[in-house]
């Protein structure tokens, strides 16, 4: 009788331990496979390690965009160790009229969605680009018409005799 009682007690203890262990597993956070990168204002270009991955808001699959690899220490690392197997990348978010945002993202930061408030204003507008000269109208004129236009330019004194001969030769060479 004592033996049965001892076995029952051991079985109860084993059931209790298994229940406690399994209930602890249920509270572990689920691994994150994707996050969303947002910006305020939206519509900014997102670059990860120099590669354009889309426009905010953008859904990012972590294994494709932030693969794990061995890295050395970075300034945000705390604790011992000199090499870490983790997700680590430089993220840059750019929008015209806003100051670009750049940060090195790793570890815990990549377990939740990211929202970046961009600093915008007229001082962050990109410099105006030089306007290209208007494209020359396509020439649909016949060679005869082009030669007549060239002659008229020479008669009006808008081009020299030498320019007239050079352009005339160029037109005739197209025959």
Image: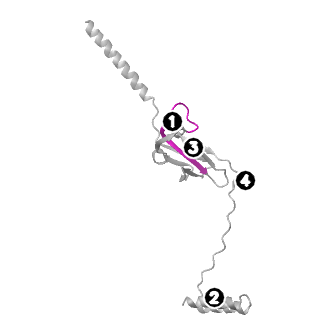
Q: Residue at x 27, y 6 (%)?
A: 2
Q: Tag 2, which secondary structure?
A: helix
Q: Which residues are magenta?
A: 74-93
How far apart are the two marked residues, 4 and 3, measured between alpha carbons? 25 Å
Which residue, as the protein is rendered here, is positioned at the far front? 82
> Residue under circle 4?
123
- Pointer 4 or 3: first along the chain: 3
Residue 39 seen in this snapshot: yes
Instruction: Give the x, y percent position of residue 158.
Output: 73, 87
Closer to us: 155 or 56? 155
- Pointer 2 with pointer 3, Cβ within 8 A: no
Q: Residue at x 40, y 24 (%)?
A: 21
- Pointer 2 or 1: first along the chain: 1
Which residue, as the protein is rendered here, is positioned at the far top? 2
Q: Tag 3, which secondary structure?
A: strand
Q: Residue at x 60, y 93 (%)?
A: 144
Q: In front: mark 4 or mark 3?
A: 3
- Pointer 4 with pointer 3, Cβ within 8 A: no
Tag shown at residue 104? 3
Q: In front: mark 3 or mark 1?
A: 1
Is 8 situated above or below 155?
above
- Pointer 2 with pointer 4, Cβ within 8 A: no
- Pointer 3 or 1: first along the chain: 1
How far apart are the two marked residues, 2 and 3, measured between alpha carbons? 59 Å
Is 5 situated above or below 80?
above
Q: Tag 4, which secondary structure?
A: helix
Q: Is residue 163 left or right of residue 9?
A: right
Is the N terminus in the top left, top right, bottom left or bottom right quadrant?
top left
């Amino acid at each position: 009788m004592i033996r049965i009682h001892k076995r029952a007690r051991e079985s109860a203890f084993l059931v209790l331990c298994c229940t406690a262990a399994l209930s602890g597993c249920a509270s572990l956070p689920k691994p994150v496979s994707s996050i969303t990168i947002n910006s305020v204002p939206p519509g900014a270009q997102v670059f990860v390690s120099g590669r354009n991955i889309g426009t905010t808001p953008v859904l990012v699959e972590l294994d494709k965009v932030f693969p794990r690899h061995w890295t050395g220490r970075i300034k945000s690392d705390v604790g011992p160790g000199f090499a870490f197997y983790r997700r680590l990348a430089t993220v840059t978010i750019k929008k015209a009229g806003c100051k670009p945002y750049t940060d090195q993202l790793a570890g815990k930061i990549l377990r939740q969605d990211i929202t970046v408030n961009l600093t915008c204003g007229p001082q962050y507008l990109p410099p105006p680009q030089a306007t290209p000269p208007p494209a020359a109208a396509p020439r649909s004129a016949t060679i005869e018409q082009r030669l007549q236009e060239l002659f008229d330019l020479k008669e009006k004194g808008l081009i020299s005799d030498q320019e007239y001969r050079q352009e005339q030769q160029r037109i005739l060479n197209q025959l």
